[in-house]
Image (cartoon, rainbow, N blue to C red):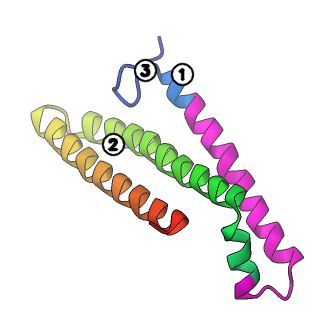
Amino acid sequence: MVTAVTNLGRSGLYDWLIQRVSAVVLAAYTVFIVAYILLTPDLSYEQWQGLFDQLWMRVFTLLTLLSVVTHAWIGLWSVLTDYLTERLMGFKATVMRLLAQMLLAVVAVTYTLWGVEIIWGF
């Protein structure tokens, strides 16, 4: 049986699928940025700013930011659960895992809000 990875009532299969979709988005964004830089040898600040002023690029960047956060959250949750719970066992492990997850949640929300502010200029 597949278990919930994020412990929010979804199945592990759903989390696996989110990680795969987010990985595809991250790969597409990376390929696009690298290709843009390589195909624009005299890249200026104005061209770079012009690229990111376009709505489709801002949406693509936002989608990539959200993909980074979800991909990292699921992956780190898995690692924390595997290593802190199985290695330490007991109440102490649960407390440490929950503290680590709370810290990671704060970092994820902070980076997401900061990224949205940078992308959209709020």
Q: Residue at x 33, y 57 (%)?
A: 107
Residues at circles 2 and 1 in contact by the CB criterion of under 8 Å: no
Q: Quadrant of residue 29?
A: bottom right
Determine the CA span between mark 3 and mark 1. 8 Å
**Labels 3 and 2: the sequence-earlier one:** 3
Neighbour class for label 1 at 10 Å: few (<14), some, many (≥20)?
Answer: some
Determine the CA span between mark 3 and mark 2. 18 Å
Q: Residue at x 50, y 29 (%)?
A: 15
Q: Nearer the viewer, residue 73 or 111?
A: 111
Q: Residue at x 56, y 47 (%)?
A: 67
Q: Which amino acid, mark 1?
A: Leu
Q: Quadrant of residue 80?
A: top left
Instruction: Return the mark for residue 13.
Output: 1
Q: Which residue is mark 3?
A: 10
Q: Quadrant of residue 24?
A: top right
Q: Residue at x 35, y 36 (%)?
A: 82
Q: Main secondary structure of the magenta part?
A: helix
Neighbour class for label 3 at 10 Å: few (<14), some, many (≥20)?
Answer: few
Residue span colored magenta: 17-46
Q: Position of residue 8 (x, y in %)?
A: 34, 25
Q: Which amino acid, mark 2?
A: Leu
Helix, strand or loop status at disc 3: loop
Instruction: Return the mark for residue 80.
Output: 2
Q: Nearer the viewer, residue 61 or 19?
A: 61
Q: Position of residue 93 (x, y in %)?
A: 18, 39
Residue ranking furthest to the left: 91
Helix, strand or loop status at disc 1: helix
Q: Position of residue 35 (x, y in %)?
A: 83, 67
In this rendering, the label closer to the viewer, 3 or 1: 3
Residues at circles 3 and 1 in contact by the CB criterion of under 8 Å: no
25 falls in the magenta region:
yes
Q: Is residue 47 left or right of residue 117?
A: right
